[in-house]
Image: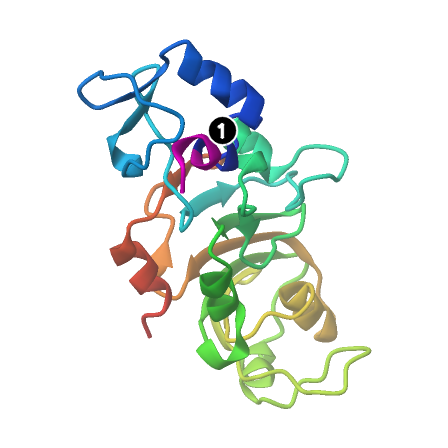
Amino acid sequence: MKLLRLIANLGYGSRREVAGWFHDGRVTDVSGAVLDQDARVAPAQVRIDGEPLDPPPGLVVLLHKPVGYTCSTKDPGRLIYDLLPRRYRYRDPLLSPVGRLDRDTSGLLLLTDDGALLHRIISPKSNIAKCYEAVLAQDLRGDEGAIFASGTLLLDGEKTPLLPAELEVISPRSARLTLHEGRYHQVRRMFAATGNHVTALHRSAVGALALDGLAAGEWRALAPADIVRVFAR
């Protein structure tokens, strides 16, 4: 791919805007030599105003989503893309959430522009565990673990029972729940089915990948070794 198109597709600006950067000598290689817009150069060798070029398509981002942000590009209010470099919102292909966390849920969120990887992660066939920590309005009754592990719990409005899930009690009103599927508002609906209400919800891990000290609102690009952890069992 020619360099002009690559840089525009990474969200830096329109092709006309980026062409102006080449004209002004702002696009160089690592040695400082000015590059031509038709050059075909490894992205790692490119600099814009002396700064490394963003990762090419195949980018995977780990974001610690705070409460109050929506997994969307267009909804009103605060969006997860507000926490990333502005140009990431305009990458082509789009940097998309891998599954979603609702506005009132915090925690580990993956985003990628690799469509094949996205579908592999969300596919039920991958059976990737997702770990959530829930704070509840009422004390646990004591039978929730058996109900969630049974594989027979049927949520309101659905015809297929949930897959077995593992519950770990943290305190009388908090628990860690590990799921192996991803249905709409699943954790909240599971506790509602037992007569309780989730007041706070946080996703702490996907597969063997955790936030590892990443603070709310912070993010980092993942290396291949990190992505392998998503599929670890």
Q: Read off the residue under disc 1.
A: 85
- Percent from the top left, x then y, of residue 175? 52, 63
Which quadrant of the view contains residue 185?
A: bottom right
Query: In the picture shown, does residue 92 fall above or below 86?
Result: below
The secondary structure that most of the magenta stretch takes on is: helix
Q: Residue at x 73, y 32 (%)?
A: 77
Q: Magenta part of the protein: which range?
A: 1-6
Is 5 included in the stretch rendered in magenta?
yes
Is 8 included in the stretch rendered in magenta?
no
- Percent from the top left, x then y, of residue 151? 58, 89
Res 142 visible: yes
Which quadrant of the view contains residue 215?
A: top left
- Percent from the top left, x then y, of residue 1? 40, 43
Q: Residue at x 71, y 68 (%)?
A: 189
Number of marks drawn? 1
At label 1, which amino acid type do we have? Pro
Query: Could you tell me which secondary element the residue under label 1 belongs to?
Result: loop
Q: Residue at x 47, y 43 (%)?
A: 64
Horizontal side, residue 175 vs residue 207: left or right: right
